[in-house]
Each structure stands twice: as C-alpha cells, then as structure tokens.
Image: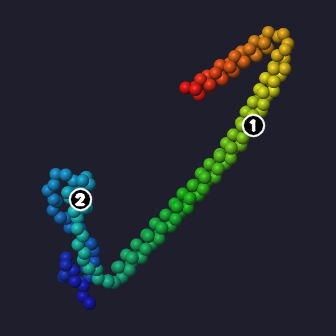
C-alpha cells in the first residue's frame, strides 16, 4: 500500500511525523497565563504519515533503544544511590535520636537527684530550727516569709 502524505505526496518513503504549525495570535491586551501570543499554547500539530521503511529505520530504532536502555540504567543507578543515601541519613538520625534520648534520661535522673538532695538539706535545716544559730534562723525566716507571700499572691489571683 503506497504512503500518502499531505505534506509530501510525491515521496512514497516519507515518514509520519508531527509538524508544528503556528496559528496567528489573538489580539488581546490581557493574557491570564502570562504567555506570549506566539507561544506553544497557539501551536497546533499537523500529523503526516510514516511509511514502514527499510534498514535505516531499524538501525535508528536500535540506536534509540540502546540510548533508552543506557538512560534507564543511569536512572536506576541514580535512584539506588539516592535511596541508599536516604537510608544512611535515616540511620544517622535514628542514632542521633537514641543518643539524645539517653542524654535526656540522664539529665532527668540528675534533676531528680538534685531535687532530692535539696529536700534532704532543707529537712536538715528544719531540724536545726531550734538551735540559736543566727544564719539558720535568718534563712528559715526568709523562706517562711517568701512562702507566705507566694501563697497570698496565689489566693488573691484566685479570688479576682
């Protein structure tokens, strides 16, 4: 069956290709898309026929296939590299998280120990409240007055 083409009816070996044809631009003062009037939005594609030809087509297809295969292989390698990099980053973040969690637990334990020691020392001071040491009496008086002020402030804010 002979090939017929709108663009080249004299050549029976003409290939089917898409050829862009530009349409005239519409005269409009405002383009919402920001495109110029002669852009791809106004280009229409004209379809012509390809004839199934000889060995040139198969060699071109083989070259295209090998190019596609090389591109796919490169893409596979790049994707694998990206995935392994992501796995390493996730592992590194998990390791950092575990380290910080251990540090956090250690700090909480230290805070608990220090609060406990503070309570122990305050109890020891309270036991010496009956002795005549001026420093201990002053500390206990100051602590008691701060406690009273704190409680009265708390009560006054509740009543308001």
Q: In x, y percent, where is residue 63?
A: 41, 73
Q: Compared to 112, does 51 lie above or below? A: below
Q: Coloured how?
A: rainbow
Viewer-nearest residue: 153 or 118: 153
What residue appears at the point 75 percent right and 37 percent down from the top-left corner? 109
Tell me which residue sits at (66%, 48%) in the image.
95
Q: Which residue is mark 1?
A: 109
Q: Is residue 156 above or below residue 10?
A: above
Q: Position of residue 44 (x, y in %)?
A: 23, 68
Local packing at callout 1 (Cα closer than 10 Å; few below 14, some 14-19, many 20+) is: few
The C terminus lies in quadrant: top right
The residue identified by callout 2 is 39
Which residue sits furthest bottom? 1
Q: Residue at x 73, y 33 (%)?
A: 111
Residue 69: x percent and y percent? 47, 71
Badge 2 or badge 1: first in the primary sequence: 2
Say which quarter of the image contains residue 40.
Answer: bottom left
* Residue drawn at point x = 16 percent, y = 59 percent: 26
Which numbered circle lies on residue 133?
Answer: none
Reply above or below: 112 against 4: above
The one of 132 and 40 positioned closer to us in this rendering: 132
Image quadrant in which you'd find residue 110: top right
Does dot 2 land on a helix, a strand or a loop? loop
Give residue 92's position: percent from left, percent from top: 63, 49
Is residue 47 left or right of 122 when viewed as pictured?
Answer: left
Residue 142 against residue 16 in the figure, above or below: above
Q: Relative to the observer, which residue lies in front, 139 or 10?
A: 139
Q: Nearer the viewer, mark 2 or mark 1?
A: 1
């Amino acid at each position: 069956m002979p090939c017929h083409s709108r663009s080249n009816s004299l050549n029976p070996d003409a290939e089917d290709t898409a050829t862009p044809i530009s349409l005239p631009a519409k005269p409009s003062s405002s383009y919402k898309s920001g495109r110029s009037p002669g852009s791809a939005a106004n280009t229409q594609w004209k379809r012509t026929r390809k004839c199934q030809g000889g060995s040139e087509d198969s060699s071109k297809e083989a070259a295209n296939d090998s190019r596609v295969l090389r591109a796919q292989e490169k893409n596979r390698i790049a994707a694998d590299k990206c995935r392994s990099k992501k796995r390493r980053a996730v592992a590194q973040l998990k390791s950092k998280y575990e380290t910080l969690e251990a540090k956090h637990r250690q700090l909480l334990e230290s805070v608990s120990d220090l609060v406990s020691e503070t309570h122990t020392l305050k109890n020891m001071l309270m036991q010496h409240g009956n002795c005549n040491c001026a420093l201990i009496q002053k500390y206990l008086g100051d602590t008691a007055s701060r406690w009273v002020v704190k409680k009265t402030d708390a009560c006054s804010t509740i009543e308001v």
